[in-house]
Image (cartoon, helix red, strand yellow):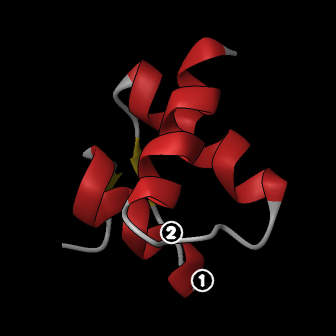
Amino acid sequence: MQYRRRATIELRERGITIRKTIDTLIATRCIESDYALLYSDRDFDPFVAHLGLSTAMS
């Protein structure tokens, strides 16, 4: 829970607003558990670029 808040704050400080809460929940779960995420929703791009979310699209 704490990491989700920090992730949201960190992205907001960079001028990025996440449009859907569920995206934050999914992304932070993957980051915390070191899972790669397969996605086609551009809303996850800030998590990859700024918070270290791994993508399975390589």
Q: Which of the labelled discs sits on residue 30, or is there none?
A: none
Specify few, some or many for label 1: CA neighbours under 10 Å numbering under 14, 14-19, or 20 or more.
few
* In-image side of 19 versus 38 (left or right): right
Location of residue 28 (image quadrant): top right
Query: Pointer 1: what residue?
Result: 41
Location of residue 17 (image quadrant): bottom right
Query: Pointer 2: what residue?
Result: 44
Identify the residue at horizontal 24%, vertical 65% (top origin).
49
* Vertical relation: 53 (above or below) 28: below
User: How far apart are the two marked residues, 1 and 2, measured between alpha carbons?
Assistant: 6 Å
Find the residue positioned furthest to the right: 21
Q: Nearer the viewer, residue 27 or 58?
A: 27
Res 4 seen here: yes
Q: Quadrant of the C terminus?
A: bottom left
| Amino acid type for the residue under numbered disc 1 | Asp
| Location of residue 55 in the rendering, given as x and y in whole percent from the top left corner | 31, 60
* Vertical relation: 58 (above or below) 55: below
* In-image side of 14 versus 27 (left or right): left
| Amino acid type for the residue under numbered disc 2 | Phe
* Vertical relation: 14 (above or below) 58: above
Kindly state the secondary structure of the residue where label 2 is placed.
Answer: helix
Specify few, some or many for label 2: CA neighbours under 10 Å numbering under 14, 14-19, or 20 or more.
some
Identify the residue at horizontal 70%, vertical 58% (top origin).
23
Find the residue positioned furthest to the top: 2
| Location of residue 21 in the rendering, given as x and y in whole percent from the top left corner | 81, 54
Q: Nearer the viewer, residue 15 or 7?
A: 15
* Vertical relation: 45 (above or below) 10: below
| Location of residue 8 in the rendering, given as x and y in whole percent from the top left corner | 58, 45
Is disc 1 in contact with disc 2, using a CB cutoff of under 8 Å? yes
Res 40 seen here: no
Kindly state the secondary structure of the residue where label 1 is placed.
Answer: loop
Identify the residue at horizontal 63%, vertical 29% (top origin).
5
